[in-house]
Image (spheres, rainbow, N blue to C red):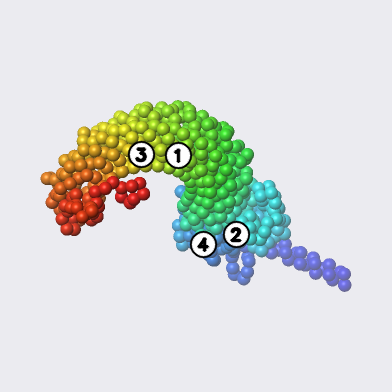
Amino acid sequence: MKSTITIKLALIFALCIGLDGVTGHSSSSVSKGSKSSSGKGSASSKSPKSSKSKGSQSSSSSSKGKGSKSSKSPSSSSSKGKGSKSSKSPDSSSKGKGSKSSGKGSKSKSYKSRQGGVGSKNCKSSVRGSNCADDEQSSTCQSVIFDIVERVSGTRNFDDDSAQQKALTWLLQDAEVNGCDVENEVIERYALSTLYFSTNGEAWNKSDGWLSEFDVCTGWHGIICPDATNIEEISLSANGLDGPLPNEITALSTLKILRLYDNKLVGGLPKDIGNLPLEILDIEDNKLTGNPFTQSFFKLTGTLTELLVNGNNFTESLPDNISDFTLLKALTVGNNGFSGKIPNSITKIEGLVDLVLKDCKFDGPIPDGWNNLQNLEVLLLDGNELVGTIPDSISTLKNLKQLTLSENKLDGPIPKDFEKLKNLRYFRASENSLTGAIPKVKEMENLIELFLNKNQLNRELPDFSKNTKLLILDLSSNKLSGSLENKGLFELDTLERLILDRNELTGGIPDDFLANESLKYLFLQDNLLEGVIPDVEEIKAINIKSLAIHKNFLEGEVPDSICALVDNKTLTRLDTDCAPFENEAAQIICQKSCCERCFVGKRLSEDEDP
């Protein structure tokens, strides 16, 4: 019996040797992606990662998801990216952010490791017909991935519905095609897939290439690698990201720019964010919370040039040592819950160009020492609870273009030397308690908007004759005096809104008050103006929409030329003192349907609607 069994085993062994000789293939050729007999008359298609040729084509497509699919590839069959469906393997040479494969039947290159080699030879699954040695190599690859995940996330055991577990599951499937022989690329794919799952990637506005077989540098939307090797920028702004930022993205050791503004990000910043070589962090207009200035965050003092966190729900105060960020050019922390005093050290960041601290809860005085920031162009401090006077040192900012101080509790005069701010275009200091005179604004020839309304300014109206770029002038609700004559206001060809109501202006309305063709809104109500309403002989005011001249001491009739502007629908609001007062005749006689609103001739109190 034993001899019979021995003979049979010998015959089987001889038969196997003979078959190998007929086919001309060794058993190892299967693992290299060559064609092998996998069934009666059938041939398996080449794997996009294991083929010897970069441009090898798979013979069929079994696409079931949103990503590009390749026949019999376990990783591609589970891909959930939004890349286009294609019967070919993904094109790793596509350029630009999130480029798609060319469509059905198009030729495309298989993914090629950026560190050399096509995919990995040690991660073939026995499910795909590979031998026992391949199973051992697959087990080794899984071990490598688990080790990487544990180093990046601190554990390999996650809740089933966590972003990390979903990313790990995808990564193990992805490794069937893309391999695990280049550690940095495995880390990238794990970190990015965690970001995808953590922020509801399936609902992103655009996610071309994500969770597909594409190289992340050339095929994943918003991932930018200037040298085609290292990820230096993630740009997914206004893309519908909804959820927390996973700490795993801090494993992207070459990431310099993170642009995620205008999304729905929640929670705090990643705890290890300081591990990144970040130069630009732009996360404005999200729902992030907590205090971003953690100990880890201060590791960025040697690299960070732009910190843009405006429009979130951050709290606490700005740290006294914020000046450690010596490279900052832009610091925008407005529209948050920051409170406390603005650190004096902030004026020591000499390279600052943009500084936005608006719409928070900052209190105390405005710091001094602005003369250190000679590159500063934008300074926004409005919407806080700042007290005290405006520092004279702001007058030294020769490059300043935009200054907003509105809605605070500032008092005292506007520094006289503000007239030296030759490049200032936008100046807003409304709703404070400022007193004294308006600086010589005619020297500020680049002014486009000037808002000083709702203060206690109590000097004569200044000369505006040289402010030829002015679009909006609002000086309402002050105690300004003097005449409208010879101030250049009605000679400014660019002026669209002139708002001077609720002051103590005297004299008459200049004859040329509607000579400016650009003027759309003219509010002169609630002053001490007298005389008659000038006739407009040559109607140039083709754009005038609102004219309010009530609550003055004007008299006479509304000229026909002005009523004609009402009739032709150009002038849609005309308010005058055309209502009788205590059974007396009205101050102004207005034709029927000419004046939209008729008032009696008395000055308004502070709480009345103009």
- If the image is split into quadrants, where does the N terminus sit? bottom right
Find numbered disc 3 in the image and state the secondary structure of the residue it sits on: loop
Which of marks 4 and 1 precedes in the sequence?
A: 4
Neighbours of disc 1 within 10 Å: few (<14), some (14-19), many (20+): many
Q: Quadrant of residue 380?
A: top left
Decide: few, some or many residues near mark 4? Use Cα within 10 Å; few <14, some 14-19, many ≥20.
many
**For marks 3 and 1 on the same chain, the one whose residue lies earlier in the sequence:** 1
Q: Is residue 130 left or right of residue 70?
A: right
Q: Which residue is mark 3?
A: 452
> Is the residue under label 4 in contact with that under label 1 (CB below 8 Å)?
no
Query: What's the residue at 57%, 37% (across, down)?
Result: 319
Quadrant position of residue 136: bottom right
**Nearer mark to the viewer, of 1 and 4:** 1
Q: Which amino acid type corresponds to the residue marked 2 in the rendered image?
A: Ser
List the single residue furthest toward the left: 537
| Mark 4, residue position | 66
SS at badge 2:
helix
First reached walking from the N terminus: tag 2 or tag 4: 4
Amino acid, disc 4: Lys
Q: Which residue is mark 1?
A: 409
Which of disc 2 and disc 1 is earlier in sequence? 2
Of the two numbered discs 3 and 4 on the same chain, state the one appearing first in sequence: 4
**Height in image: 71 above or below 435?**
below
Element on which disc 4 rests: loop
Q: Which residue is mark 2?
A: 75
